[in-house]
């Protein structure tokens, strides 16, 4: 049996996944079963269109220890309050102070209000 090695691991948001599935669908004309189910799920769940702009805004906040994977998860779940944000980041070994958490939720609320 051949051994598979992971070369790189890159976090991807649901918005980015939806775009990648669209590219695959355009290229292959049809998605396989799993990809079709994933696309169906994303169409039901996803309504946020400005993920790229929000990613740029959160990156420019320059919050210490906040990595790409954390930002992608924030974009996927769009926390409205500091408490919601802390629940989301609880799964990571990351602590941010209340001032930075407030900056993040303010940025998220600005973008989700525009939607």
Image: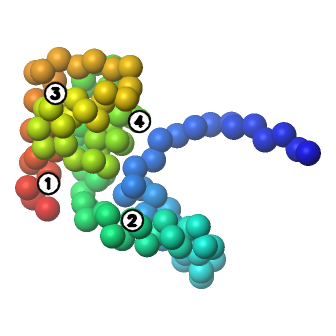
The disc placed on residue 63 is: none
The residue wearing badge 1 is: 112
Observer-side mark, 1 or 2, equals 2
- Which residue in the rendered view is the most extreme toward the right? 1
Across and down, in percent, residue 87 comes to: 25, 33
SS state under label 1: helix
The residue wearing badge 3 is: 101
In the picture, measured across the screen, residue 10 lies left or right of residue 45, that is right
Quote the CA–CA distance across marks 3 and 2. 27 Å
Mark 3 burial class by Cα count in 10 Å: few <14, some 14-19, many 20+: some
The residue wearing badge 2 is: 42
Marks 1/2 in contact by CB < 8 Å: the verdict is: no
The residue wearing badge 4 is: 69
Observer-side mark, 2 or 4, equals 2
Quote the CA–CA distance across marks 1 and 2. 18 Å
Marks 3/1 in contact by CB < 8 Å: the verdict is: no
Residue 115 found in image quarter: bottom left
Quote the CA–CA distance across marks 4 and 3. 16 Å
């Amino acid at each position: 049996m051949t051994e598979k090695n992971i070369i790189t691991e890159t976090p991807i948001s649901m918005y980015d996944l939806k775009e990648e599935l669209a590219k695959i669908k355009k290229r292959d004309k049809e998605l396989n079963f799993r990809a079709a189910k994933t696309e169906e799920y994303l169409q039901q769940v996803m309504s946020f269109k400005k993920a790229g702009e929000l990613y740029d805004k959160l990156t420019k906040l320059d919050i210490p220890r906040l990595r790409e994977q954390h930002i992608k998860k924030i974009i996927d779940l769009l926390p409205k309050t500091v408490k919601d944000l802390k629940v989301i980041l609880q799964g990571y070994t990351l602590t941010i102070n209340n001032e930075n958490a407030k900056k993040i939720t303010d940025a998220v609320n600005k973008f989700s209000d525009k939607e």
